[in-house]
Image (cartoon, rainbow, N blue to C red):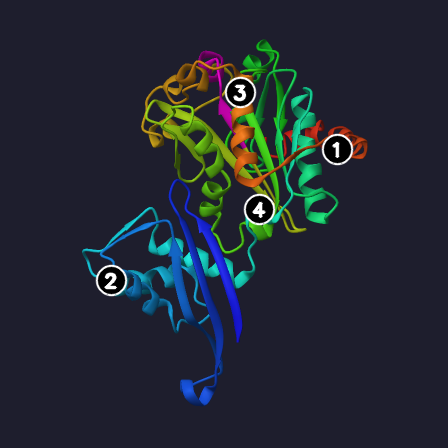
Amino acid sequence: MAQHHGEYKVPGGKLVVVDFDSERVSAESSGGEDREIIANFKLSGDFFLEPDDALPVIVASVNGLDVRTDVTQISAAITDALPADTHLIGFSAEAVGVAVRRALTGAAQWRDYEWSILHEPALSPMMNAALDEVLVNEVGSGKRGPTLRIWEWDEAAVIIGSFQSVMNEVDEEQLAAHNAQLVRRISGGGAMYMEPASSITYALYVPEELVRGMSFADSYAFLDDWVLEALRSLGIDASYKPLNDITSPLGKIGGAAQKRIANGAVLHHVTMAYDMDAEAMTKVLRIGREKLSDKGTTSAQKRVDPLRSQTGLAREEIISHMLEVFTGRYGGTADKVTAEEYAFAERLVAEKFSTEEWIRRVS
């Protein structure tokens, strides 16, 4: 009999904690093949649940489930067992399922790591994209611990997703007129127009075990929960809009993108508008009517609401506050990009990121 402990902080919600054993059941007693089940299941956390007697119902619905049961099946078992008038506040049946899967798969918690914080002088946008590839591979290979990096860049750029078409996304005449660099990143997602000091971009380089047991969609919100706390503490009514948008009632604030690396690391990065030139953005980016319609607005300029207009704070003050919230939650020590990491990134710029083959891999 093995013991398991799992935790899941619901993005924007409460902490769900599960403790249980996995117990071998013989074919004779189960009427089929040998299998392993969840036993002695306990659920706790700082969530709210009404009525009180719903807790033992949830516990009973999970006890006896096969350890191979996935999140959707665990959620369905709980939902089917609960009376219709049950209220789960700050968590959900799915959140319990995620906590169970994280316990079974050995998922790590944020505080299991010693975090490095990188906030270095401005680089070219292309170097920043190359460093993302270098650092996530360093984390995956064990040469670097989990890291949070704040981007700083020295010229305007359009950074397109790995699978986007240059022709469909970028007006290259306007790109040149705005003296902006065209960069293709290694993660998917949409195009961003970025000007120095007008955006806030950060990247997380984490081991896959931190998001183990989660769907891709759940991992996006999970990795950005700390920044929602930071924005809310600045008076912004920030929330996560699936799949990858950080938004507020006044408009979209930013978007996230991810890349899973074969060596077991995850790159997760976010760009938020600080004082964005919406007119320039709509000239340089070819934002189609279908995309705008999908976002529920007819004006691209209304889609993005800069942090400056919502807080009145300097960009540096917002970044400083974000880092305070992150280190307050998870710890972290100021660090530096090594000379070897810079050298590797420079080679990647020369051999990959600056080449027409890469930039126009989807023309």
Q: Earlier in the sequence, mark 1 or mark 3?
A: 3
Please tell me whether mark 1 or mark 3 is closer to you in this view: 3
Please state if 301 lies on the left or on the right of 296 as rendered: right
Camera sees residue 166: no
Q: Earlier in the sequence, mark 3 or mark 4?
A: 4
Q: Which mark is residue 201?
A: none
Label 3 residue SS: strand
Q: Earlier in the sequence, mark 3 or mark 2?
A: 2
Please state if 105 lies on the left or on the right of 72 as rendered: right
Instruction: Specify few, some or many for label 3: CA neighbours under 10 Å numbering under 14, 14-19, or 20 or more.
Output: many
Q: Is residue 3 or residue 199 the one in the foreground?
A: 3
Label 2 residue SS: loop
The amino acid type, in three-letter code, at marker 3 is Ser
**Tag 1 and tag 2, C-beta contact below 8 Å:** no
- Give the residue at x 48% y 76%: 23
Q: Earlier in the sequence, mark 1 or mark 2?
A: 2
Please tell me whether mark 4 or mark 1 is closer to you in this view: 4
Q: Earlier in the sequence, mark 4 or mark 1?
A: 4
Instruction: Specify few, some or many for label 4: CA neighbours under 10 Å numbering under 14, 14-19, or 20 or more.
Output: few
Q: Is residue 67 above or below residue 96?
A: below
Q: Position of residue 242 (x, y in %)?
A: 40, 39
- Give the residue at x 33% y 46%: 90
Q: Which residue is mark 2?
A: 53
Q: Position of residue 132 (x, y in %)?
A: 66, 34
Distance (Cα) linking label 4 and label 1: 32 Å
Bounds of the magenta segment: 270-282
Q: Is residue 108 or residue 274 the one in the foreground?
A: 108
